[in-house]
Amino acid sequence: MKKIKVLERILATIPLMLGVAILVFVFMRMLPGDPVDIMMGDSLATEAEMSMIRESMGLDEPFGSQLLSFLGGILKGDLGNSYMFNAPVKDVILRALPATIELALAAIVIALLLGVPIGILSAVKRNSWLDRITMGWAFLGISMPAFWLGLVLIILFGVNWGLLPTQGRLDHFVELKTITGIYTLDSILTGNLEAFKSSVRHLLLPGFTLGANLMAIVARVVRSSMIEVLEQDYVTLARAKGLVEWAVVTKHALRNALIPVITVVGLQVGVLLGGNMIVEQVFSWPGLGRLVVDAIYGRDYPLVQGAVMLYALTFVVANLIVDILYTNLNPKIEL
Amino acid sequence: MTLSEGKEILRDSSRLWWQNTKDFWRRFRKHPLAVLGLVILIIYILMAIFAPFIAPHDPNKQSISNRLLPPMAFEGGTSEYPLGTDYLGRDILSRIIYGSRVSLLVGVISIAISVFVGFVLGAIAGYYRGFFDTVLSRFSELLMAFPFLIFTIFVMAILGPGFWNLIVALTFKAWVEFFRLVRGEIMSEMTKEYIEAARALGRSSKEIITLEIVPNIFHSVLVLATLRMGYMIITEASLSFLGIGVPPRIPAWGTMVADGRDYILNAWWISTLPGLAIVILVLSINLFGEGLRDVLDPRLKKD
Amino acid sequence: MLLDVKDLRVQFPSSRGLVKAVNGLTLSANKGEILGIVGESGSGKSMSLLSMLRLVPKPGEIVSGEINFNGDNLLKKSDREMRMLRGKDISMVFQDPMTTLNPVFPVGEQIREALRIHGLIKGERKWFFSDRKDRERERVLELMAEVGIPSPDLRYLEYPHQFSGGMQQRALIAIALAGEPQLLLADEPTTALDVTIQAQILELLNRINEEHGTTIILVTHDLGVAAEFTHRMVVMYAGLVLEQGPTRTLVEEPAHPYTQGLLNSIPRIEDRRKKIEAIPGTVPDLINMPPGCPFHQRCKYAKRECIGTELEMIEVDKGHQVRCILYT
């Protein structure tokens, strides 16, 4: 039964993504001015050349058939050409994607690795000074813009203490053969310890900056749901069985307390994707977010359009995964 | 109904209102941090309103001889520029004071529009259901497929920088959350008995919505609006930081942080102080919002 | 004597003051008997049971007294020693089976955990792997069968929500039995269940008592249940024992006005003409307890001396004691 329901969920995202594509297309058509004008920018093209380009792009066709060929292109993986790079949007995006994925994963790992234990500790030592301090920090974490936190970290760790690198993904003197484009993974695959250390060091500040918000939210949710769970009868039963307290907390309580956390993480993926643009900008991280910002400055609309659709797709898929995880963690729910 | 009866009802209801307000304050006061948040928020609002009277300098006045002065507590700083100056010699304190106008205006206006649109559409969709509801719900799901900041950046990329463009970009997606809240609440309120009773008494549907349902869901909407306002302000600052928010000539905190980025090696204050202003404002709004939630709508506590 | 509780006091700080949940409880349980603790809700029965496992929820704490189990004072044991006892020598069955099984683990695994914690089943090494897990599983299936869960091998991997209330309670009894405890604490084990299921569960407890000789302390607010299934009975009120004695004696010749009141409030089929009388009033505030007999405000025989006189238990018959001024 569950498998069929999961399949239904997956199929339901198809019309949603179709809607997303149409919405993006409609928005792009609302751009003030002629796309060819914008595309040509300051170059001195003749009117005849312009109309030729217009024709080659299908801009003289009616709106409906333009939309259809746009959607058809997407299905074939054709997102148009980037003006800035003079290359297919798909290739430009794929080149920048590994860096973004690496950063996002680092942020999620950091957020969970710090947020979950902080939340548990705060719940177990409720109302202690430890609880107050960590929850104060968590509250600060959700009130802090990522670009500011990033700059403060750069000033402290980079400029003042000189502890960590603040720009880019790798020290310039380190060489690395790329396979996946995810440097930490590549360095492990090639057995390059120096590159591994360098890429992890480069990941720490941007990863923490991007994950700070999520970490704060995770810590708060884990705490409140843990407090609720610790008062449940099944926790008392686990103690009455003679289980040691840490096992009571990490096995019986945590598994239940994590169920709402999954949902919250799913909702926060959106914030993470948006934050990725900011953080990549602050730390000169050569990923998709930075690319999009550059594309906006450079009025490279096909690239902006492709990236926005990819972000939406990621968000939708992330929420789908969360739904499925949620079902698997909580035996009571049958989707 | 005689005139005196009417007066009595009016007096009773105003007494009830007063009673509720007093009751609210009594409970709200028990959250010292929320009160602190409110106080700071009021200070910010006063700062924004009276900016020309408080600011020691013209926020846009450049003074080449006073470039990159540190805050007065640090070596080389003067009391004339308490928080130092930026790379054009503009007074940071004055710019922060003026910058509060952008942040607060954007936060308040975009939330107000989102609440209004979401409330009206949500009420209609939740009450009448049908085709209108289906179309709006599908559309709201579509908008929910975009991460908030990404969507706003996308809209701003198309519209270009500008105060009202920013408001449009922010509200374009923000109303959805209020729409869904109001729609859901109305649909659940509709199943309750007092609505049946009101119908049986011959009340029109407009009366039922405005007199019976709205007061019941007002608290939830108010709490959500407060909690979302901080996020709106952060988003505005992020867009301004990227250079696609308010036009550069208007002093805005996000722009100021971006301006100072090139100088963090020797003039950390240009970036960090305006950012601190954002943090404190958003923190106080969130503290106030959480207190409000505890008092008004404990149900919302489950994030 | 298996369990001997002396002058146990449990208190909870609250915003209004100290809540005296258990206020000088003294009772004992003999090996092999079923002892009933009877009282209205709020009389401190559940808290007394949790104290015997030293699991009083925070911020409550045991402030004084002795709980002697096999002659050792449990309150003097280290946390580790206490843990070794829980689930092995002393087990507990809780009130609401719906909330007591952990919703995210299969029922069979939750029973197996009770075996594993105390290493009750030893495995043998075969090649590199121990067969302990399989043996534990075998034992779990035995336990499930013993408590009356049909087709245990099919239900082993089912989750709690797939069990009915009665089956959940049986599973919880299986967990409690896993350690072959000397003492089984049952806190209102049938309150959350349907009437027909109640009798089955109580029969099961009775059978366990007879077959294994397990001492059972059955806490209930239902005097009828206690009358039918216990050997001896303790009547608790406001954290204090008011009367104790053999069940038959207490039912036939209740000495304390409170016990009499409880008995009169049970509807009886065989005696329809008799009027059912509810005891007027409610349990007193556990924070501002009046000195003297805690029941005097609701007692129809109350005299002026009841207020302010702290009474000891008075032996009215062999093994039958009562705390009431009428018997001084």
Image (tube, coloured by chain):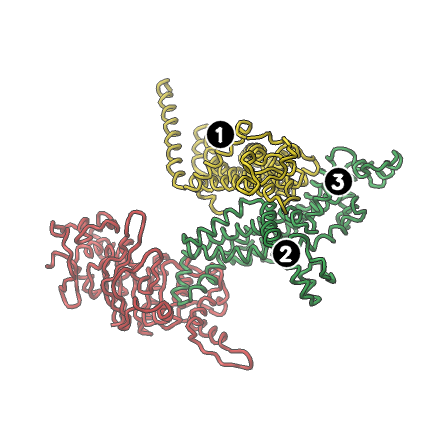
Chain colours: A green, B yellow, C red
Q: Position of residue A227 (x, y in %)?
A: 43, 54
Q: What element carries label 1?
A: helix
Q: Which residue is drawn at 28% across and 73% down?
A: C70
Callout in the foreground (1, 3): 3
**Image quadrant containing the N terminus of chain B:** top left
The amino acid type found where label 1 is placed reads Thr
Residue C179 in which image quadrant: bottom left
Q: Name the residue under label 3.
A: A299
Q: Name the residue under label 2.
A: A203
N-term-proximal mark, 3 vs 2: 2
Q: Name the residue under label 1.
A: B210
Q: Is mark 2 on a helix, strand or loop?
A: helix
Please state which of residues A47 and C308 is positioned toward the viewer in this rendering. A47
* Distance in Å between CA atoms under marks 3 and 2: 30 Å
Identify the subunit bearing mark 1: B
Asked if one can make out residue C262 in the rendered structure from this viewpoint, the answer is yes
